[in-house]
Amino acid sequence: MLRPQFIVVLRDGEWRVKHDGKHHGPYRTDREAIRAAIDAAHAAGCSGHEPRVLVEAPLSRNLHTEWTYGDPYPPTYLGSFPASSPQTGRFAD
């Protein structure tokens, strides 16, 4: 089974989601980018994949797993804001 990865990164002062070699965004905050990545990963999981969301630490560039398909969705710790950005709208994979 495929394990797609959605990686939240900070590039040039903007939060983005890297997936399948493309950067999506920008998002105003890391929380917006994480929520967009989780929404996209959840949709991929509903299609039979086992995606996960990783977040890259801005200084060290180390990755940590933020969410994996099968974890509670939507995650309550992110709040109820929509996963969209005024600049770009919804994440599309």
Image (spheres, grey):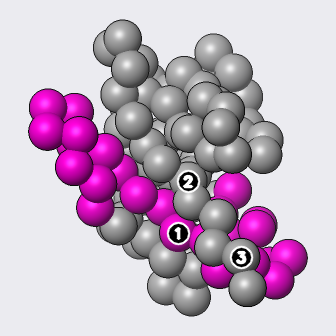
Task: Give the quadrant of residue 30.
Answer: top left
Residue appearing at x 78%, y 41% in the figure? 92
**Label 2 packing within 10 angstroms: few (<14), some (14-19), many (20+):** many
Residue 39 image label: none
Residue 6 image label: 2
Residue appearing at x 48%, y 61% in the figure? 53
As drawn, the residue found furthest toward the left would be: 60
**Label 1 packing within 10 angstroms: few (<14), some (14-19), many (20+):** many
Q: State left or right for residue 11 relative to residue 19.
A: left
Magenta residues, start to end: 40-64
Q: Is residue 59 magenta?
A: yes
Task: Give the quadrant of residue 2.
Answer: bottom right
Could you tell me which secondary element the residue under label 2 belongs to?
Answer: strand
Q: Is residue 82 in view from this perspective?
A: no
73 above or below 10?
Answer: below
Number of labels in the image equals: 3
